[in-house]
Amino acid sequence: MQVTFLGTSSGVPTRARNVSSVALRLEQRSELWLFDCGEGTQHQFLRSELRLSQLRRVFLTHMHGDHVFGLPGLLASLGLAGNSSGVELYGPDPLKNYLDAVLESSSSRISYPLEIHKVREAAEKQKTLFEDNEILVTCIPLTHRVPAYAYRVQEKDKPGRFNVNRAKELAIPPGPIYAALKRGEEVILEDGRIIKGNALCGPTRPGVSLVYCTDTLFSTKAIELAEGADLLIHEATYAHCDAELAYKRKHSTSTMAAQTAAEAGVKQLILTHLSPRYAPGNAITPNELLKEAQAIFPNTLLAKDFLQIDVKARCNSS
């Protein structure tokens, strides 16, 4: 998995930071998933190496404008390009009414399949939101001024690496049999021998896990969702000295994000959704927020627009 930050500011854009959006590229399946879509997100696509035509799923955390105002324009542009095979949207209950109203009033036509999923029930009842042979997506409700949700993308464990040399030593003919053995299946050869795929594969390789958590106050549910994740992307709207504002507006401070990462035992934390009040040149800068978080959780990075991160799974011994 590869993460690209397309917007890392809260509320309003700044010269250096657009409003919220994070792209997840699933390279092996040539798909792109998007988390939030603030105003100007499609312009951020144009400034990146990402291909909008690969967009398959969009996950919205909540309906505040800095997280959704870019969605209608992006979907309309995707339709005009004529190269989408379909997009699935996941978000709060009002998402469908919002999109229907904007697209209808602007006479915009979506020329590809568009499906909208409400996430509230899955979040509240801890049900699976999405699952296929490779990936599982779950979500939980957060603590914000409007209904908001965090998402976890969990890649399923993969079979261990196939030992081709050992297969050749056993005179196993290449082709479909190799594919079955790589999947860990048991096959019967023409000479009657029974070969177990697990015997020719190394240790199971753990899948990669990513959690996207914004906007919220410190949340025990977020800790549960992020448990053991390889990467936690968490909002840090405020510095610790502005905790009173964070409680009032139901956002997190840098220290709240770090505490979540520490208690969840994640591998890495990246701070995003920074208030414009901490722009460079002001009394408190984003680097101060980073230092506050690192004092609690050392393996913390500060997001910036167009930062790319390859998410790596933990080794089996960890």
Image (spheres, rainbow, N blue to C red):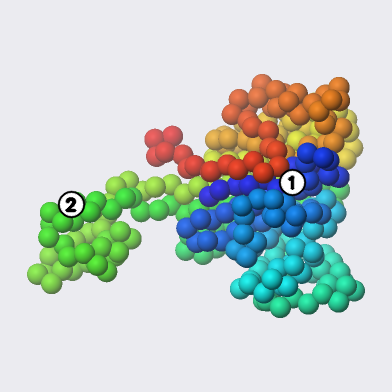
* Image position of 252 with respect to 18: above or below: above
Give neighbour class at mark 2: few <14, some 14-19, many 20+ (Cα, 10 Å): few
Give the residue type at disc 1: Gly
Q: CA distance from mark 2 to mark 1?
A: 48 Å
Q: Nearer the viewer, residue 149 or 26?
A: 26
**Residue in view at x 78 percent, y 32 percent:** 253
Q: Which residue is mark 2?
A: 166
Q: Which residue lies at the image location 54% right of the left edge and 56% below the top edge?
A: 26
Quarter of the rendering containing residue 198: bottom left
Query: CB of mark 2 within 8 Å of CB of mark 1?
Result: no
Up the image or down, 28 lies above or below 108; here it is above
The extreme left residue here reads 191
> Where the C terminus falls, by quadrant?
top left
Circle number at residue 7: 1
Q: Position of residue 50 (x, y in %)?
A: 62, 55
**Res 163 label:** none
Q: Position of residue 107 (x, y in %)?
A: 86, 77
Residue 244 in sight in this render: yes
Q: Quadrant of residue 112?
A: bottom right
Direction front: furthest residue: 47
Quadrant of residue 242 within the rendered picture: top right
* Sequence order check, earlier mark of 2 and 1: 1
Residue at disc 2, secondary structure: helix
Please give left or right for residue 14 compared with residue 233 in the image. Answer: right
x 79%, y 47%: residue: 19
Q: Position of residue 210 (x, y in %)?
A: 58, 47
Residue at point 68% right, 37% down? Answer: 303
Type of residue at label 2? Arg
Crowding near the residue tagged with mark 1, few <14, some 14–19, many ≥20 C-alpha atoms within 10 Å: many
Q: Position of residue 15 (x, y in %)?
A: 82, 40
